[in-house]
Image (cartoon, rainbow, N blue to C red):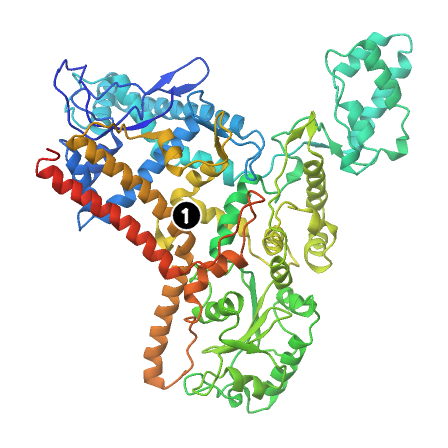
Amino acid sequence: MLFYVIFHYNYFDTNQGVNGVKKLLTLLGSVSLTATTATMAVACGTNYDVKDDGNSVLIQFLQSIDGKAKITSTDILWKLINSSNGPKNREKLTLDLLKMINLSILANIDSEENKFTIDEDNLYTNYDLKNTLKERWANAISNVDRQIANEKDVYKKEHGKKWEKEWNKMLVEKYSVYQDDVKSMNKDFLENKYKADILLTDSNNNASKTLLDVLINTDQTGVTWISSNDIMKKYNALKKVVEENTSNDAAIASYLKSDLDQIAQINNSLTDVSKDWKETKLHSESTDAELVAAAKEAIKVDVQEIKNDTPVSINNFTISDTNNSRAGFLSNSQKFFLDRFYNTQAPLAISEVVIPFSENGSFDDGVTVADFKSLDGNDQVNTEELLTQISSDNETGDTWRRWMVEGKTDKHPKATVKNYDKLMTLSNSADFTQDMRAVVYDFILGENKNGKPYSKGDLESLINEISRNEKAEKFYVYDEDKGRVYYVDSTGLHIVQIDGYKYFKDSKGAPKEGLRQEGIKESKINEHTLNELNEFKKYNALQDNEKVAALQTNKSEAYDNLNKTIVNPYLHYLTNSSMLKGIAGSASSFDVMSEVKSWAQVSSSTEGGASHWMTSVFDYFKTISKVKDDKKDSFKQEEFIDNYISFNVSEEKSQEEEVIKKTQSWFYAAVNSKQSLAAIDPAILFIEASEKWTDEIKTKTDASGYPKKLLKNDEYKEDIVSNTIESFWKPKVKVSEEIPSNRNLSNDLSSIVFDYNLVIKNIESSYLNFNKGGIK
């Protein structure tokens, strides 16, 4: 049975024998869990709460707001449109229903009645995802049963013989809207409601958390490794068995059957080239002659060449991981969230050198070269030498990198250095000053509209260009080759570097066709996936200094061979550099996937405007799903929603039917608006932070007369969304897919607000019509 959330408006209360038709907007079948032989399945039964319908997320939603029990269709509408709490209620109900969809997706991942199935060839589909989710669903149900059993044990301990009476009272109080005692309760039904409540809302065992754990917290599946020393032991043991049983094939065959993988392990250990590794071809049905022949052939190898670790088997993936051998290897589903984050947040790795004002220097009365001159004359000399060293640094920035590792510069004892452990993003206004963000994003997204090329002159000429006085033409200068910007604020002269800038420039002309990790092909792990597992194993076995050399200082082949399916060069840089977080000698300390995980969590609040978290799981499954037995390449989002939420809309015209249709339209629009806002929220947050900071600076300027040149991004703020999509592109899921462009922020926002408000007005009209008697 499909796990449906059904909006219904009439039913016969069979439990009470009432012949009349009830007029309620309700959710049916959302919690009816029934045991089967293998696991717990979800049934779409009509086993209602005894008096009316307590099995309703909508009713629970309303009850949590005002405690009302007798609820009609118009109550739902009123809660969604009223001026005081309407927006908050719409937000809550949208999330509740999306969580319900997540639960339904998990419960029905392999249901025959599900109209959709996972597209195994999709760019973001993990190998064997369906079976993984089936196992997680079984575990989730088992955990819920165990959780309830443990709670019953607590009741038994606290209440003794009266525990069941107290338990029943709790069920009625928590999970029945209309019942006020336990005499007429349907205990099994209310306990099933309890189970469903856990699966929807429990902090440790809800369905959305389970799905995210699989999709975003689980790295690429891999293999278990066996060392060359252990393979040598197997070789010696096999050789001894063969030599001692020259006339006893059965003994050799029996020994070999105890470990059929050993022949492949011995042969594979002769090379570290993974594409030459062979799968295990022997099996339990192999004849004695086949087994003996394989054993005799295996012991002929050059024993001196058995020197490479190999997988225990390349016939299948394993869950266990030897010594974190594949740490940092992203799965296809992780890349979905990573690509979305990159495409909307415009993340940048940042490091900087700050030269402070000298003892008599000040920002408030206007910045001149004199502010960087000390009485003893040392500051100006040190600053000039430091600027020369920065501008003459080689293209790979070796000197700059060394400073970040050592925590100081060579030439200026007062200068400070910092490599940020957070990525600069359009949304992150907590870890970076707005001055810095204004300059950096003008350089990256604004086509340098407020900057000019750095002429590499002396300190005085530099300060004159960026002093932010009335005559200043621009508010920063930039070094295009090294990805550095120079500007002043109240703390001094800042030289900020976009780390990995070379890769950012490379990404502008890079191919945008997406790649994916493949699974099992022709009875063995895909050659490219196996090769990358081998590369990760080699990398993770390195010492810290060797890891830094491989990914940062010398850039060995390892850099290119790790996470090869991330085709955007700068995102590839961010991903691989994240593996150096916390390692001594590394010039970087950020972790992009850690930030992605924080951004995509369903349990997040809307703080920071991160709309994506509400639809993240929904978006993933819509992306990787296809219609069963249908050759069409696409489907409407409404079809996907209706597969898991049925609004039970018919052609019959009635007051309630109109209400249901309007509520259906509202939910469609709510999901659409959340998805649309996810793409532009970061830009909105950036602009809001910029305008707020500008207003604060203006206030200070009125008092001090400085600075006259404000750090504003007005010239490109309307293009910030389209520029982000273009510059921080995500790969095409299909070769023919076009990357959207020419997005105007105001137009985007106006369109979203207009479309959604239109639906709300429509609901409001329906509510008024309903109160006046409805359709005649």
For label 1, count other residues whose C-alpha is less than 10 Å away and answer few (under 14), some (14-19) or many (20+).
many
Q: Is residue 666 above or below residue 626?
A: below
Q: Determine whether, in the image, residue 176 is placed left or right of residue 768.
A: right
Quadrant assignment for the N terminus = top left
Q: Is residue 47 above or below residue 554?
A: above
Q: Is residue 654 visible?
A: yes
Q: Seen from this angle, which residue lies furthest left?
A: 772
Q: Quadrant of residue 531?
A: top right
Q: Secondary structure at mark 1?
A: helix
Q: Determine whether, in the image, residue 562 is placed left or right of residue 67.
A: right
Please name the residue shown 44% across and 18% down the image.
39
Q: Amino acid at mark 1?
A: His
Q: Point out residue 749 in the picture as x, y percentages from the top left corner.
A: 35, 56
Q: Which residue is mark 1?
A: 612
Q: Is residue 494 visible?
A: no
Q: Point out residue 119 in the picture as x, y percentages from the top left corner.
A: 53, 32
Q: Quadrant of residue 227?
A: top right
Q: Is residue 497 above or below residue 239?
A: below
Q: Determine whether, in the image, residue 681 is placed left or right of residue 531.
A: left
Q: Point out residue 234 in the picture as x, y percentages from the top left corner.
A: 80, 24
